[in-house]
Image (cartoon, grey):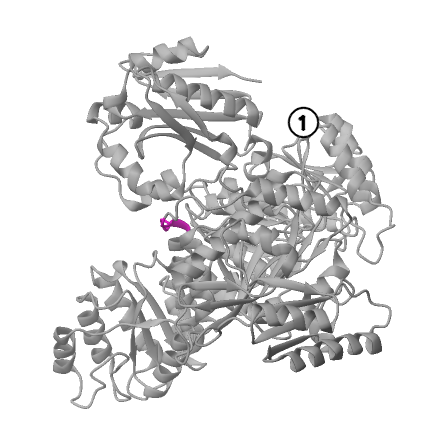
Amino acid sequence: MSNITAFLKPTSIAVIGASNNPHRIGYIVVSNLLSGCFNGPIIPVTPKYTAVAGILAYRSIDTMPIIPDIAIICTRADLTPDIINQLGHKGVKAVIVIAAGMTPTANHKDTINHQQQMLINAQRYNMRIIGPNSLGIILPWLNLNASVSPIPANKGNIAFISQSAAVCTTILDWAQNKEIGFSTFISLGDACDINFAELLDILSQDTKTDAILLYIDNIKDARQFISAARAAARNCRILVLKSGRTNMGQSTALLHSNNEISVDEVYDAAIRRSGMLRVHTTHDLFAAVETLAHSVPLRGERLAIVTNGAGPAVMAVDALSDRSGKLAQLSTETVAKLSHVLPAYWSHTNPIDIMGDANTTRYQQVINILLDSDDFDALLIMHSPSAIANSTHTAKIVIDTLHQHSRSQRFNILTNWSGENEATDARTLFTQARLPTYRTPESAISAFMHLVEYRRNQRQLMETPVSIGEITADPHYVRHEIQRLLQQNIYHLETHEIRPLLESYGFTTLPTWIASDAAEAVYIAEQIGYPVAVKLRSPDIRHKSDIHGVVLYLRNANEVANAADAILSRVALHYPSARIDGLLIQRMANRSGAQELRIGVHNDPVFGPVIMLGEETIDWNIERDAVVALPPLNMALARYMVINALKRNKIKQRSSLEQISIPALCQFLVTISQMIIDCPDINALDIHPLLISGDELTIIDASMDITTFNGDIQQRLAIRPYPKEYEQQCQLKDGKQILLRPILPEDEPTHKAFISQVSEEDLYKRFFSEISELNHEALAKFTQIDYDREMAFVTVYDEMIIGVARALSDANNKDAEFAILIRSDFKGAGLGRILMIKLIDYAKQRGLHTLTGMTMPTNRGMITLAQKMGFEIDVQLADGVVDMQLLLN
């Protein structure tokens, strides 16, 4: 990450356009640098002044005495491209651009694009840019305030990255009041160069950063963003506030930028898939920041509530129920202990109502009893104004009680002190004691549920999917048929045209026939048997419901003839110029006890193909009626999609109908995902309805849009799918046939078995330490990899893994580190050479520069193999390691 390190560890700053005019940006930046006590040279550059704020100024960039680590440009937008040239010639590699108005908006696309020229000039010098339209950066741990913000930032462990300068100042103002600090504070502005992905990569490894907050207007490179987010979310907590949730909000955002607009549900899906947590309002973000600043990782979802008022507790429980939270169940032992210190008429359950006459002693006793138990995972302590228990004094007692109890650090503690005046002082005490505190019961519950939802997203990120084996499919046939149709200039397909394509992937479809008129419709109906459905087929009328173009449950020849004539008559009346390609005739499926679902594939302008699931409705709307998931899907991800749809009532398990088989629906979704991956020319797919009865799924109607895909197939999806192209059959020295392929998330059980059959000595040589049995989290990191950043090849014999080779590249895709491990009873069979050749070929194909590895001097087999493969060997006996390096491209 050396190309952006200068922004985060600068030792010198130049301010281009520095000024002594208090109303100029150049004055504010210099003042902030000085007030922040930055311990490095500050170099004002301006032809107008001899000195700025008492610091000697330089008339031009070329006269600067040193090459600064960062240059902050505070001039007009139209001057910026030329200034970038001058800075590049001087040798400056990191620039912050404050000026706005450099990007043409949607209404002014023909405006001269200063931003584009600025980027061209910067790339000439390998220069990196934050901005334009940036507020700047604040690095509290370096005493650096290189920003236009009127509010400084305290030192802390939260990194904040925002595309909105206004949101930055709002957050800073609130954080000052709450005494919450930051490790890094970056205003990306229009993010024309440095973006969220690169900063996530570096900040997730920063020792002073425990959590990262993002304010997002839009994402430009979804693939890069999700890849970085998935990696970063394994190291620290990441929260996202995304604007433009509504159509009106998106339209407003479009006025200020020229970026693609994505459906909000798709952003939701991407954030969940990446293991991050989304909050929807600034208030939620504030609550989440406070929780993150003061909380330990949530160990479970059971919440206990202590209150001196029943009403607020009921409001808290209502809010918890609305968010699908869990109330802790108190054990008999805990209830008995509480009964000894509480009045006889206390609630005897959770929430624990200690009554309105509760004094500080009662709070103290109840908290200690709860902390001694294991009945809960998080504790919400509530207080309503009371004449007996003064708000501020009670807060002091609660704080002392929590600090004195040895087990308090094991739980998440939240507080809700209601009211103003005295309650304000109490909440200040909690903030100073690093205990999250909230004004209302609902905001406290919202903060707790942020932790719960984040934990759920993390578990989704690490869950091992069930394997469904090979999907029955013939992608070559589907691709060939689509190409044939495209050559005939056919871009929209209806049910009867899609049927063979769907059946080639193992889907069950309802047979469909075509009739040219009413007479032929009657003839077909007589052949296939009643009841039947008659449907219009017209390329000019996409929605048959517009002219009542679907008639169901026709039971005899007269009904079929009348329905067919009526459909054709309505078309002639309302759409006289529409082309009619006949009538579709289907025998009615048995819908007794079955539910009608709708599954679609939508090509999102930002995230590419996405899969949608909901119930069949006449006026289907993605945001209102569907849940969304990003392919590729496996069984675990598909299950989360279905459960999410059930929880949000997008689909319903109706008691009067046969229950939906979740495994069967998941397998259907996984197969749809595979079809979309295999066939890039499928632009959209709409299955409406999908009839589901138990584990029987039948496609009744479907439509598909196809187009010639000319882009990079690998970059088409927001998440890189399993790279099947790397699969190959190999042969060991003794003639055994093995399969060499990339690792899969479903490999966790076999990978665990593989590790168990490697000797302790070989494991020590691989990991440089003693390795006991690996837990699920460790195995998930080995098997659930991001194919954009990492590769692990496994060799499989008799359905068991016998060898693994890994290559992990840096974020700049220049260098990769490799490691190889072979099952001890397969050593000497030629497996190491097979895996090493595969890694080298892969690294060259990725365009990597070097492949490096490290082993021990005692690992003679690995060292010898590396030498034969052309690696340079550097034996460092003093350190007990051997470095291996191979130059590639």
Which image quadrant for residue 292?
bottom left
Q: In this view, does 560 lie to the left or right of 658?
A: right
The front one of 107 and 602 is 602
- Quarter in which the C terminus is drawn: top right
Residue 301: image location, x then y, percent: 32, 65
Is residue 616 visible in the rendered image? The answer is: yes
**Is 463 part of what is drawn in magenta?**
yes
| Residue in the picture at 47% in, 63% down | 697
Dot 1 amino acid type: Ile
**Is 378 contained in the magenta span?**
no
Residue 695 coordinates in the image, percent (x, y): 40, 63
Front residue of 58/113: it is 113
For the point 64% across and 41% down, which residue is it? 480
Identify which residue, 710 or 517, lies in the foreground: 517
Q: In this view, does 517 lie to the left or right of 109?
A: left
The image position of residue 4, as x and y in percent, is: 59, 35
Residue at the limit of the structure toward the bottom, as seen here:
345
Q: In which quarter of the image is residue 326?
A: bottom left
Q: Is the magenta stretch mostly helix, strand or loop?
A: loop
At a point 49% along the width and 40% down the height, the residue shown is 722
On screen, residue 640 above or below 84: below
**Does residue 703 show up?**
no
For label 1, the SS is loop
- Above/below status of 862 relative to 561: above
Looking at the picture, how far across and down is residue 811, in whole percent?
53, 34
Residue hosting label 1: 66
Residue 488 left/right relative to 4 = right
Tell me the quadrant of the picture where the N terminus can be found: top right
Question: Range of the magenta residues?
Answer: 461-466
